[in-house]
Structure formats: C-alpha cells, structure tokens
Amino acid sequence: MESSGCDEIQEIVIVGGGLCGLATALALHRKGIKSVVLEKSETLRSAGAAIGVLPNGWKALDQLGVASHLRTTALPLQGMRITWMDKGNEKFTPYKNIGEVRCLKRSDIVETFADALPPNTIRFGCDIVSVEMDPITFLPSLLLSNGKRIGVKVLIGCDGWRSIVASFLGLKPAKTFRNCAIRGLTSYPNGHSFPLEFVRLIIGQTAVGRLPITDKLVHWFVAVQQGTDAKFPQDTQFIKQRAMEAVSGHPADVQEMIEKCDLDSLSFAHLKYRAPWDLVFGNFREKTVTVAGDAMHVMGPFLGQGGSSGIEDAVVLGRNLAKTINGSCFDHEEALDRYIKERKMRVVKLATQSYLTALLIENRPMLTKIVVVAVMAIFFRNQNAHTQYDCGLL
C-alpha cells in the first residue's frame, strides 16, 4: 500500500477505547482479525460509573465470550420500582417478564474487554486531531496531536458524542436534553439493605435512581433539569454538594448514600442525543470509514440502552468485516454497508423511543405530552420490546 507521508500503516484502526471501541476490537479478535485501538486517555476510561445491561446486551456479551465472567461481578435485579413521592403513587415492574437485568461497573466491563485483547492492541495517549483521505491511496489517514500520521485501511470511530470521525462523515452535532445527570457509586463495607431493584424516587422535576451492583456496592444518579447552555464544574466536591442539594427532600437513606459516595466515581453533565431524524438521513460511511456506539447514535439513558446498543454494534461490525476474509463480502466497503443496513433501523427505533420518553420526563407543555403519549401508544405499544432484540451470532 502506497502512502503520502504516513508514518505507519494499519489494517483496522478503532478511535476510542471506551465500551464500544474495546468491544469492537474484541469482536474482531474473536474472528481472528487484528486491530489497533487509539485512546487519547492515558488509562482505561470508566466515566459514568456504571450501566444497566438488559437482555439484549447480555446476548451481545455472550457473543463476545465475556458474559459469564461479568455475571460474577453483579447481582441480577428483580424489577423496577418508581415512586412519585409528592403524589404518593408507586409502580413496580418485575423483570421476570423481561429477562436478565444487571447493573455493571463500567470499569469492570472495560477491564474485562481489555484483558481479553492481545497485548499492545490499545495505544494510550493517542489524541486524534483530524481525519483525511490520502490523495494517493484514497484511504483514510489520521493526524495525531504529536504530528504522527497513520494510514488506515478501515477506520471505525468509537470516539463518543464529540466524535472527530463522525464530523469527518458530515454527521450533525449531538443535541442536548434539558436534563442533566449526576452519577456516582457508593460502597457499603458492611453491606446495604436495599432490595435488588432499580428504584426511582421522583419529587417534582428531580429524580433519584438507585441500582444495587453487589450487596456492598450501589450505583446511583440524580437527574435534574437545567438550561442546555449551563456549564458544570467537574470538581468532585462541588458535584457532591450539588447532588446533596438536589435530594434535600428525599429520604435519609438517599441522602446518606450520596454523602458517603466515592468521590472519584462522580460525574455531572448534560444528557446528549443524536436526533432520530439525523439518524434517518445521516451518512454513516465514507469509503472505508464508519462509526459505532455514541459516535453514531448517542442517546439519553431513558431506555438503559446506550451501552448495550454500542456492544451490539461491535458484534455486527465484527461479523460483517469477517466476511471480507471468508469471501461472503467483496470488500470492506460492502461489509460496512451491510453493518449500517443492519444497525440503522435498530438505532433509529431506540433513539426515537428514548427521545419521546425524554419529552414525557422533561417540563413540556401538556399538549406536547398528550401527542407524545399517542405516538408512543401507536409505535411503541410494547415499551419493553427493545430488550428482546437479538444482534445475532458473531
């Protein structure tokens, strides 16, 4: 392969070493395909503390060969309980009708993925400045902040909602919900007494969520509404104080949970999403460049599918890129087209349901909410159908 000024050439490069990026590298590895992951951080990333994994996510993790190990890190949840504390109403939905649901620490997932990869697959401290098409090979090349240029045969952007690869493809910037979320973990050395349920406590426009991970560790979030242009300092003491203020009217065990939180686990940010209509009309491939995970379809956490959908992407990508080796696909471009065709309607449906759910949660006019309820009743009559999706065999 000729190159105009590239310092090195790689077959497949994945930009971003988060959940989706490492899952994609692992999917390719399971199919006997080598890849390189370029991660700008100096260590594995686990921002966001933890994620819920629904039945469709477990199917994808099973295909990657890591589900059995990850099951040992978290207890199964029995259901979801929503309490509107200012109204005195409560609703419980058992998970036995849905399937396996657990809350996993992000660090457990990324470390499990990384440990299953060959040595030197992940390169830390690689900050991508730009993506360009090589004028000689007509293949993508990456410019790093240190001035190094890497030529690539296949480029997969798993670099989150601010994706440089997505910008190269011409995708519109992610939009901002009115909701923002504080997330964290709290350890109970002597054990906690919380039921194994996803609990949501709602007072006015503030919601607190609590998901036990083990009998000594709990994931929680505080969701509040704030202007979309608000800036959030990332000082952990400030974040903790903001969370304490938000839950001042909540039960004592909620306040204690936040008071005793692990400061290093805290994050505070607006919730981002890629609009469903942008997904319908967006361009997800340019020659041998594509995107996956949040870079493709960042969505609010309202369905609990952000992480699992990215792992699904990884399985489908691995399956289709492997077809270029066994002869089922003519070339990489055809393989990427097949990947996009498989994933597009799935992520459009998820993004649409998530967006509509956000409109119901946010402080919107009653007429808007009536219209949303009507649309949901027509298109998402079974609101848990998204959990039964199967991304297929790797």
Image (tube, grey):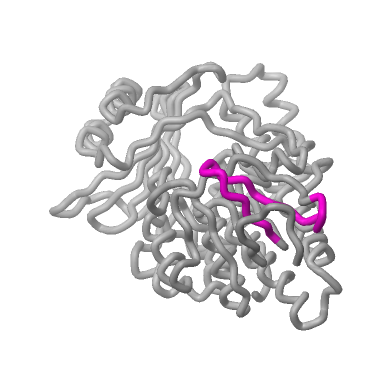
Q: Where is residue 262 in the image (x, y as percent from the top left)?
A: 25, 41
**Is residue 388 among what the camera can see?**
no
Q: Residue at x 43, y 75 (%)?
A: 68
Above-or-below relation of 65 to 130: below
Q: Where is residue 361 in the image (x, y as percent from the top left)?
A: 57, 29
Task: Classify residue 208 by image quadrant.
Answer: top left
Magenta span of residues: 135-152
Please, which residue is most extreme toward the left here? 190
**Left or right of residue 296: residue 246:** left
> Which residue occupies the foreground of this view, 192 or 268?
268
> Which residue occupies the foreground of this view, 394 or 37?
37
Q: Position of residue 35 (x, y in %)?
A: 59, 67
**Left or right of residue 178: residue 221:** left
> Which residue occupies the foreground of this view, 309 or 21?
21
**Is residue 241 among what the camera can see?**
yes
Above-or-below relation of 336 to 93: below
**Left or right of residue 229: residue 44:** left
Q: Does the magenta stretch include residue 392?
A: no
In the picture, the quarter occupied by the N terminus is bottom right
Please, which residue is most extreme toward the front here? 5
